[in-house]
Amino acid sequence: MKAMIFAAGLGLRLKPLTDIQPKCLVEVNGRTMLEHVIDRLKMVDVDAVIINIHHFARQIHSFVKQKNSFGLQVEFSYEEELLETGGGLKKASWFFKSDSAAQDEEPFFVHNSDVYSDIDLKAMLDFHRSHRAVATLAVNRHKTSRYLRFDTNQRLVGRENQKTGQEVLLTPGIEFERLSFTGIHVLSPKIFDYMQDQSGRFSIIDTYMKAIQEGALIIGYRADDSFWMDMGSVERLESLRQKLKSDKKM
């Protein structure tokens, strides 16, 4: 099974730590965030990973080599200019193509490198397959300024940005719930069909909105009872470190 890890970002929220290293190599209790994410992916039999890189790209490349690629096939997608999540995934689309028609239908994970969770990825993958979705997004109720809107069947139907006031509801008048995206997706390779007229720098959420309008099923996987935290600041990173230290003592 394949996966993509987003690790190209500048890590501005983690300054000054990211003045000398990429965010995915920031350590949490002696291990980098990249290692934590890869460990999680290996638990669901991921054996091939592509990592997008930009900020301190050579550090990431050297670290992966030092770790013998974690026993996986690891490829890199270097971005001269940051392409965001959609553009980054499209640039790496070659990695998810194969000579086998059956493998071309296999879903794959996409995981931010700056999030730590114990979300059940195996259950999430099973959920994705059972619904035959084009994309499944792990969501919860954490507080954010950017929400996704889901109908009563957990289908993605819109988005909202509370900072800008932008709101999208693709089916006006329906009942919906605001949920927060965790940065963990399961995708069908069919997602690339909806990117054909998108280029350069763009968000994967833009692709999801376009796919919905063309009849695709984008669905939310509820992870309300799982632990999840992103490294939104140095303070949050320290909070995560303290939590993991406390858990280790128990």
Image (tube, rainbow, N blue to C red):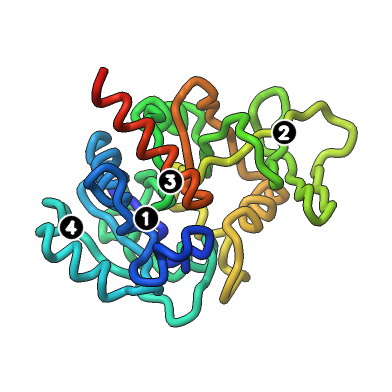
Q: Earlier in the sequence, mark 1 or mark 3?
A: 1
Q: How far apart are marks 2 and 3 (CA)?
A: 26 Å
Confirm or deny contact between disc 4 and disc 2 (CB under 8 A): no
- Which of label 4 and label 2 is nearer to you? 2
> What is the distance, in whole Å, between disc 2 and disc 1 at their CAs?
26 Å
Lower position in the chain sequence, tag 2 or tag 3: 2
SS of the residue at dot 4? strand
- Give the alpha-carbon distance from disc 4 to disc 2, as whole Å: 37 Å
Tag 3 residue: 237
Labels 4 and 2: the sequence-earlier one: 4
Q: Nearer the viewer, mark 4 or mark 3?
A: 3
* Disc number placed over residue 52 in the picture, else none: none
Q: Residue furthest bottom?
A: 80
Does 226 sit left or right of 45 as displayed?
right
* Residue at the disc numbered 1: 5
**Helix, strand or loop for disc 2:** strand
| Label 4 – label 1 distance at C-alpha | 13 Å
Q: x and y percent of residue 214 in the render? A: 69, 51
Vertical comparison of 249 with 157: above or below: above
Furthest toward the right, the residue is 173
- Residue 243 falls in image quadrant: top left
Q: Residues within 10 Å of mark 1 (few under 14, many from 20)?
A: many
Give the residue number, with chain letter if any, for mark 4. Answer: 73
Label 3 is placed on what type of residue? Leu
Number of marks present in the image shown: 4
Q: Residue placed at 36% from the left, 75% from the top?
A: 78
List the residue tagged with mark 2: 178
Helix, strand or loop at disc 1? strand
Is residue 191 rendered to the left or right of residue 37? Answer: right
Residues at discs 2 and 1 in contact (Cβ within 8 Å) = no
State the residue at coordinates (18%, 70%): 62
Disc 2 marks a residue whose amino acid type is Arg
